[in-house]
Amino acid sequence: MQLYCNSLTRYSRLKTLEVKIGDLVLGNDNPIRVQTMTTTDTLDTLATVEQTIRCIEAGAEMVRITAPSKKEAENLLDIKNELRRRGYTTPLVADIHFTPNAAEIAARIIEKVRINPGNYIDKKKFEFIEYTDAEYNEEIDRIRERFTPLVKICKEYGTAMRIGTNHGSLSDRIMSRYGDTPIGMVESAMEFLRVARDESYHNVVLSMKSSNPQVMVQAYRVLIQKMQDEFGVCYPLHLGVTEAGDGEDGRIKSAIGIGTLLEDGIGDTIRVSLTEDPEFEIPVCKDLVKRYQDLEKSTAVLPSAQEIPPIEKIPYSPVDYRRRSAHPVGNIGGSQVPVVIADFSASQNIEHKDLAAIGYAYDAVSDKWNIGDAAADYLYTGKNQIGFELPGTVRMICDQAVWAGLSERTGVYPLFKSTEYPGAKDRSGVLNFVSVNAADEESIELAKTLRNDETVVLCCWSSHQEAMLSVRRFVMELMAQGIFVPVILAVESKDTTIDEQLIHFSAEAGALLLDGMGDGIWLMNDPEKIVNTRVSGRTYMPTKNNYQFLNNTAFSILQATRTRISRTEYISCPSCGRTLFDLQETTAKIRSVTHHLKGVKIAIMGCIVNGPGEMADADFGYVGSGPGKITLYRGKEVVKRSVDSAIAVEELIHLLKESGAWVDPLAVAGI
């Protein structure tokens, strides 16, 4: 298949057309731009202006403002004028849903409009319609007739446009022909892009957003291939994971989706959608962009001897998820969920209480262990030993030299350096971990000798500055060679803030997991190097326990990549001027009473624009439908309308119970 990026083994920005948004130039070799969206009522001019200024001063290079009707669109002029009066010239973007008239007004006022092809013209009724080709073409003609006026206005006024597809709001027409798929997302945008091109209008940016990073990444890859095949060029790409949520989970999910694409040089502007005040999205954006700006500078002067060898053929489909085949070794590989390894090598005196940080709480009175859903599978102690009996569900890994001196080896396995294993006479007959550096040419040669050793698990890391590309190249070579040894993804971060570490771990490990690579995850850092923290709307402090931080991050990465579900998943919109309740407070309240429902996906949407469509694949939805009123959904089915917000959370719990999705929290806690 055609490659979706310039290179799989060297960082290189994808060439795209340049787009002008006011005085800002986007695309091609220009810097990756960062942006956010206001959460104020657009009709409240001063509140919107002041929040926009906070976003600009935080570093936003574009600020998006919702314009759900003609009144809000018209008020954009007052907002723009007040910003200009105060000396701010940052481009503004109008966010349009359902209302072409509002888009046509906004396009005459501000620098960019964003339309959603799923609901700009179509009314979504969740109906399946069988179209003949002639009937389908009539629908395309209808789009052309209704969309062309906006294109002409944008062309006349020099206004840029984003055609922004959302996975959860594909039209009935697209769903009927293409289904709920990445290709459906792409075709939804392409229908509108073809109209723009026919009018010789090219000041266009595209996006393919989803709350599922895997779907989002695949859709962008398909879009790039489609544009290259049909037009021979790529338009600039706006990256984002929609409804990512808040806190660490929101940052991790966003970094996985956005970071996976940025790793391959894809993306011209980004927005991290967090259920927090918009100015707190910008530092996360800047941390993400900085990672690749630094990489671009360093790889520009990379000696040829340090380049990762090119891969001749991709041995998997980058647009169709399938986990790499690996034979099972114990509970690793095969069809088993990826394991988590907790690194305790820096602790010389490990006590019962220390294991609480990785999901094992010890009760000294009963001499029993309480095991959580996010409990690590393996504990690496390095050169150290443990002086007490571990719970039966966790196994221990130690360095080979320590393991060799143990008299009791039940549940304890050795870690070999790559140079130690071939000549080792004392090995485990059950499970041997072998550390391999993907950047060493000898590693693949070693792997070839281990293809028939069904006791080996490779712990793969890379000393190369493009570590993800290096590890991916190594795993692709395993696939090409037909080597089915399980692989643990070992990622070490030397970043100095928690946010940077979350991004590093998520982008590097998440990118590989999204492509089906990895039978486990092992995160490492040096807590002594974490020199500062960031306040993000709430007190955002590093976890009191570094082991807990690494363990929680590992499980969050697996959850976000849908490779191992260990807790409730929340699909929460980032709030905007349409929001009909306090989204942050409500999200926290719902989380507090439902966080024990492992595997249940709950969407919390501020208004009817973002639900039910934006809820994507949520099991249940809590959607603002009017001031003080909530509509509850089971999947995409309305179950209760106009529920008073004072009792809506209780009604959601009742719906969960009715649907058989509720579990008593005391039962979960074993009480």
Image (cartoon, grey):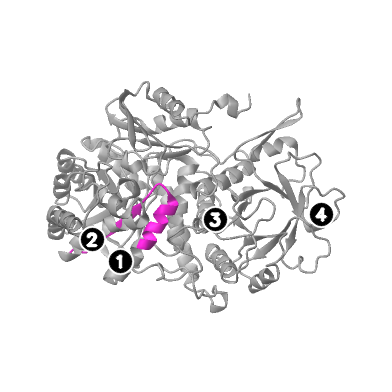
Sequence order check, earlier mark of 1 and 4: 1
Q: Are marks 1 and 2 in contact (CB under 8 Å)?
A: yes
Provide the secondary structure element on which disc 4 rests. helix
Marks 3, 2: nearer the viewer: 2
Residue type, numbered disc 4 = Val
Q: Are marks 4 and 3 in contact (CB under 8 Å)?
A: no
Left or right? Give the position of 412 relative to 659: right
Marks 1, 4: nearer the viewer: 1
- Residue 23 visible (yes or no): no
Residue nearer the viewer, 626 or 534: 626
Sequence order check, earlier mark of 2 and 4: 2
The residue at which mark 4 appears reads as 402
Residue type, numbered disc 1 = Met
Task: Tell me which segment is drawn in magenta.
Answer: 201-222
Q: Disc 1 versus disc 2: distance between alpha carbons? A: 10 Å
Residue type, numbered disc 2 = Leu
Tell me the residue at 20%/36% (across/down). 43
Sequence order check, earlier mark of 1 and 3: 1
Quarter holding the C terminus? top right
Left or right? Give the position of 394 relative to 240: right
The residue at which mark 1 appears reads as 227
Q: Are marks 3 and 2 in contact (CB under 8 Å)?
A: no
Provide the secondary structure element on which disc 3 rests. helix
Q: Disc 2 versus disc 4: distance between alpha carbons? A: 62 Å
The residue at which mark 2 appears reads as 193
Residue 395 on image: x %, y %: 72, 46
The residue at which mark 3 appears reads as 509
Left or right? Give the position of 318 relative to 339: left
